[in-house]
Amino acid sequence: MKRIDELKKDLQKIDHKSYGMYKTLGGSYDYGKYLLHIDHVQGDPFASPSRLRLEISRENHGFPDSFYDTKVRKLALEDQVLRRFSSGLRRLEKGRMGSGKSGRISTCLTGQKVLERIAVVFSENKMELRFEMGFPARGRTILAKEMEQLLFDILPKLAENTLIYGNWSGNARNAVKTALELADDQDALRAELEKRRLAAFVADGSILPRESGVSDLPMRGAVAFQSPESMRIRMDLPHKGTITGMGIPEGITVIVGGGYHGKSTLLKALEQGVYNHIPGDGREYVVTRENAMKIRAEDGRSVLHTDISMFINHLPNGQNTRDFSTENASGSTSQAANLIEALESGSRFLLLDEDTSATNFMIRDQVMARLVSDDKEPITTLLRHIRTLYERFGISFVIVVGSSGDYLSVADHVLQMDHYEVKDVTETAKEICRQEGLDHSPISDELSFPEFSRVLKPAKAGRIKCKAMGTDTVLLDREPIDVRYLEQLADEGQTIGLVYLMQYILSAQKQPEKITELIERIYKQIGKNGFESVVPPNYSCGQPVLPRKQELAACLSRYRQAKIQGR
């Protein structure tokens, strides 16, 4: 540990020298109330910025223990500290400091959701804040004066303003209080879902539409959500008090309505309800079972040793669908694999939209059944099995349909979206089904649940190069994994998180292990030791955000080079 006056002297010694001399500054420095760790120094002014970390003890940061005594409060507090630091960065008035990324300070971006990050971490005895900084240079020549301004003027102001609770204004403290109380309420809401056997809850007054297709901000002037009387329930929350809203029971719920009337908007809100939202988002009290998974068709994806026999059987080439692999899945085959893999990852609440589904996976009408007999058709539709999946195995569904009327006959609840207004039309739908002679699909005692026996064998030892590309692609040793259709990835940092988790699995696994047990073990480790425990200390792809175990399982299943063994 060095003193900051030593850092200043070391900096003056390397002024106007080659950029590589910046590496001599690596290490830890005592700033009095807090420590500065220079964990990694970039090799070039145009390379990824240097990684730094501020550390402050519990006694010096002053945040009350009650602010982070539960997991949801801890995440909400870390989110608020990160947003304050980011706000301080935006207010900085500094000009260009040289070539490339010189002088640029950045950290993990924040959006409308509260997610687990390594950017700010509270532990029992301290708090750490991670960020990146471009060390100033002109060409490849060190600019010590500009670096001195960053380390001894700008950074201390940011640290004092962010790390020490006593320096927070009254408004900032109120914002923290609001965020913590909201986290408590959201946690209570999720607990009520389990108690009341609900798949999801949407509070009255919620703003579901978003500003645009590329903005997650709430739409101004949007119609506020109001629940239908028949499905309205009351929820008592510790801080908000009593709220009302629509409780979606376990079972099969079908959403219908004309185009542009809000069907997909409601489904999207339910998809994202697996995460907590920040105050003012409009979806603060929209909560969904945490293991909910959006299922869609995904033409061309790789499938590895997956038991899709529930939906695909007696293929013309005789391929075994209890241990099915393909490099180029069709729409129906990919959707079947996606559904089975979601169940393997622990999901028991599935969300589907007719618009992004394979038609022949969803339905097969009577005319086509007469022309092509069952013994000639290898695909068994979801419609035929959906009641059995719920009645026997407890799998709930919310399905948006615009033209697949047969799903009305298997629904427990039918909701109609009319100009963003929700109407319960269950009885009307049932009457129409009776008039049309549509009956519920039978409950099959013969349908068997997949065994989920897939095993991942250890990969070859060695360094694995990795990269994240937006929310679309994970790159491992130049092998792209397409994750763009994992629609519940909510943040680019989660793709980075997938990179590190995949890297951790492939480099740390010592013996063959069932995929279900492997992922469960990793998330237990994260729960005990923090997300940073599986992130390499020399990470270089950016600051990660923890994805759900469902997305990690899906990413692993799409990795064509994975050594997965089936039945």
Image: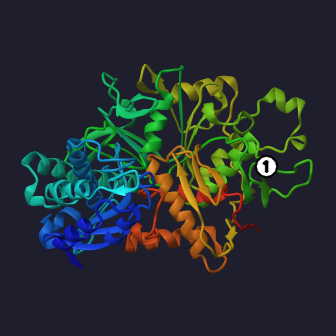
Q: Residue at x 62, y 34 (%)?
A: 356
Left or right side of 35 for 522:
right
User: Measured from the top left, where is residue 566 in percent x and y?
Assistant: 75, 67
Seen from this angle, which residue lies furthest right? 317
Task: Give above or below for 227 relative to 302.
Answer: above
Residue type at the position of mark 1: Ile
Task: Give above or below for 227 relative to 558.
Answer: above
The N terminus, quarter of image: bottom left
Q: Residue at x 38, y 43 (%)?
A: 201
> Mark 1 highlights which residue?
312
User: Measured from the top left, where is residue 464 in percent x and y?
Assistant: 60, 66
Q: Residue at x 13, y 72 (%)?
A: 59
Quadrant hosting residue 437: top right
Crowding at label 1, few (<14), some or many (≥20) Cα neighbours within 10 Å? many
The C terminus, quarter of image: bottom right
Task: Give above or below for 553 relative to 229.
Answer: below
